[in-house]
Image (cartoon, grey):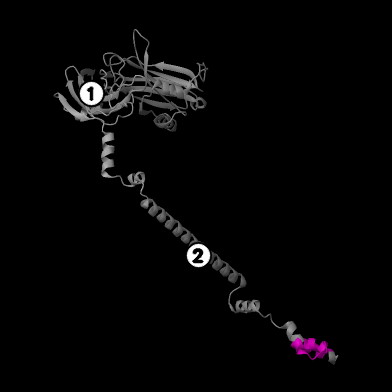
Amino acid sequence: MNRYGALEEELFLSPTIIMAKSANTTSPTVASTTFAPATGIWGWIESILNKIPLPRWAIYTIFGVGVFLILLLIICICCCCCKRKKNKAKEKEKIKLASVKNSVTTSLVQPDIEGLKKSQENDYRGRLQYSVEYSFQREEATISVKQAASLKAMDSGGTSDPYVIVYLTNDPRKKNETKVYRKTLSPSFNETFTFKLLQSEIADTDAVMQVFDFNRFSKHDVIGEVRLPLRDMNLNHVIEEWKELQAAAKSEYEKLGDICFSLKYIPVTSKLVVVILEARKLKKMDADGFSDPYVKVQLALNKKKWKRKKTGVKKNTLNPYFNEEFNFDVSLEQIQNVDLIISVWDHDKVNKNTQIGKIFLGCRASGNALRHWSDMLAHPRRPIAQWHTLQAAEEVDKTLGLKSNIKLPIPGR
């Protein structure tokens, strides 16, 4: 019993001594080699980590963040180096481009004075002499084309076959033209043209004189034009002057006029209320410079003609006032698939009535028309009035793509 007690004491006091005794060896080397702490770099790292007063997970996290920051710094340095190399390459290219002694390249980079003079000469189109007179009593504008000088040569022989087209922008359809003068750059026209022009239209009207080169077998080339805003001219006396031709503008947009109407939708009664209020600056359709306008209000359902009504005819006016109300039965389900078509017509007793312009509203519309329709639906039982610019009937019909008429039963009956 005393022997076992001594062994237990030795076990608690020193495991190395017990191991040595049990092996009956006196070699301390074996014991120290087996249980000595690890040596080398890992032992050194382990000893350093043991000295840091932080848990291991915190030490590993800090180490990972540090490695990430170092990698990020290396990437940034590489990017900066690449950018510098690219900039140096671009600078070398610029230097090479500047050193090239090519006449074309030099003219593109910095044209000389002679080149500028040549380009100005090529852009010069010539001059036109004209006169403008306006009669406030007859409300007529008289434009005389006198002569032209130093016109631009449009033919291979160094000449042109010029003639002049004259019109007012209030009605671009009515165009007058002079005679054609063969093989000359300084023709004398001396032709006069008269246009009907109301005093109320002067502020929005330009007088246009376009000089063309006549070609027998191809399209006529425009040499240039003179455009005169009549609102900037003193029409109390005759104006006669020379002016240089400018590049011709694109073809005139034909103004058909504007129309104002209000819309109201009442969901409870399924009523669509359209009030045609007035129109202004309608296109002239009659020889006397006026029109006899009336308005058609039409509904189309699922791209098929459905219902229509029309206003009375207003005689001899381009600014009619209607103030007529129309009611249509349209359910909530149908209102999403309905197109409201407003068209302005010119009444003619002898010939067929002519369409002046058209516009349509609905969920398929766009721009102001769609906005007006959306405002009506967003504010039920409230009339929403708005002006709209009339469009060409052909364009609207093409967009609508309507089919043949259909007859549907009136909801609620």
Q: Nearer the viewer, residue 318 or 78?
A: 78
Q: Is residue 30 left or right of residue 169?
A: right
Q: Is residue 18 covered in magenta?
A: yes
What amino acid is labelled 2 in the image? Leu
Q: Nearer the viewer, residue 153 or 406?
A: 153
Q: Residues within 10 Å of mark 2 (few under 14, many from 20)?
A: few
SS of the residue at dot 1?
Answer: helix
Answer above or below: position of 30 versus 108: below
**Do callouts 2 and 1 mark residues in contact (Cβ within 8 Å)?**
no
> Residue 135's x, y, as percent?
17, 19
Q: Is residue 289 covered in magenta?
A: no
Q: Residue furthest left?
A: 237
Residue at image point 16% right, 18% down:
137
Q: Which residues are magenta?
A: 4-29
Give the quadrant of residue 378. top left
Q: Nearer the viewer, residue 47 or 187?
A: 187
SS of the residue at dot 2?
Answer: helix
What amino acid is labelled 1 in the image? Ser
Magenta segment's dominant SS is: helix
* Count of picture labels: 2
> Residue 105's x, y, as percent?
36, 46
Give the quadrant of residue 139. top left
Q: Quadrant of the N terminus?
A: bottom right
Q: Nearer the viewer, residue 97 or 207?
A: 97
3D distance between C-alphas at marks 2 and 1: 74 Å
Residue at image point 73% right, 86% down:
32
Residue at image point 31% right, 29% down:
249
Q: Earlier in the sequence, mark 2 or mark 1?
A: 2
Reading the image, the residue beneath label 2 is: 73
Reading the image, the residue beneath label 1 is: 200
